[in-house]
Amino acid sequence: MRLVIISGRSGSGKSSALQLLEDVGFNCIDNLPASLLPELVKRVREQPPMDDTRSALDSSPQLALGIDARNLWQDVQQAPRVIEELRGSGVQCDVIYLDARSPVLVQRFSETRRKHPLSDNRTHLLEALNREKELLAPLAAMADLVIDTSSLSLHQLRDLVKTRVVGQESPGMAILFQSFGFKHGVPVDADLVFDLRCLPNPYWVAELRGKTGLDPEVIEYLRSHPQTDEMERDIAGFLDRWLPAYQQSNRSYTCISIGCTGGRHRSVYMVEQLAGIFADQFDNVQVRHREQQK
């Protein structure tokens, strides 16, 4: 069976992620105490298959559970141990942790007028968010996938969960190549980060400024500089050496973030090149250009 744990700070999009998983066939339970997980898994495993006409994917039970600050403190603290025990019993268990920058979360609560589960007359919102971060730290530390929803719309979040969680039907590791701009912040979901700011910048060429690394003119400009090819070979060589080791350590997801200043020229070009190289080696290679989705 497959079990997906959705956790993260309030306002980060956990309910939307669970709704997406429910839409695609997962049985979803929100705010389930971690202490009840083993019994739930046992009951699901004991259920007989519905019929012989279902596909191999559908015939395997799929559960998605939300664990967050609404659970008791003691319950959240024991969640990592319970999850590891389930994994040891043969359950495919993925932990997905959603988060966003604190100012973004404060704005979301202000717009929706919702009350934070840890706030009260003596605890203001930002203090509650910081406390919640401490409370969920054990789950964040063991997460297979961390998603920063700060710059994602509801539809973008649902698409990202679908491609990175639901779309991974093959047993291999899912690899996301992501471009970003350092001036907008390093992605919190990055496992590996490469900095391209030392390469020639098309932004300073007037006719290229409004284009991106997907445009032929920018591609030609970057390829005309030997440093670009050298950087591509070095990054590809590092990944070729170490990605198999990541996969052998039973990682389900690896996010490789490539950054330049604004995230629209050099990093976009390099992500496309690297994704093309490794698509032949891995079954599930995805691409995201963060700054172009804003």
Image (spheres, rainbow, N blue to C red):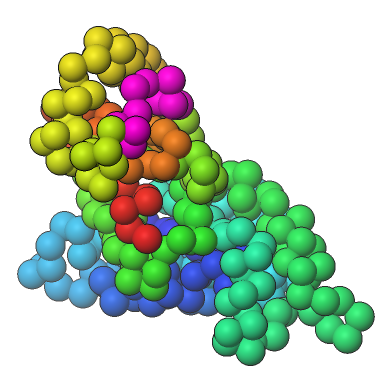
**The residue positioned farthest toward the bottom in the image shown:** 113
The segment highlighted magenta reads 194-204
Decide if residue 11 is in sight here. Answer: yes
x and y percent of residue 11 in the render? 58, 73
In the image, residue 7 above or below residue 234: below
x and y percent of residue 108 in the render? 58, 77
Quadrant occupied by the C terminus: bottom left
Report the front residue among 147 and 32. 147
Quadrant occupied by the N terminus: bottom left
Residue 227, magenta (yes or no): no
Is residue 280 rendered to the left or right of residue 97?
left
Decide if residue 212 is in sight here. Answer: no
Q: Residue at x 15, y 40 (%)?
A: 215
In the image, residue 54 above or below residue 141: below
x and y percent of residue 24 in the render? 26, 71
**The residue positioned farthest toward the front in the image shown:** 206
Q: Residue at x 54, y 67 (%)?
A: 12
Is residue 30 rendered to the left or right of residue 276?
right
x and y percent of residue 89 in the render? 48, 46
Report the front residue among 96 and 61. 96
In which image quadrant can residue 60 be found?
A: bottom left
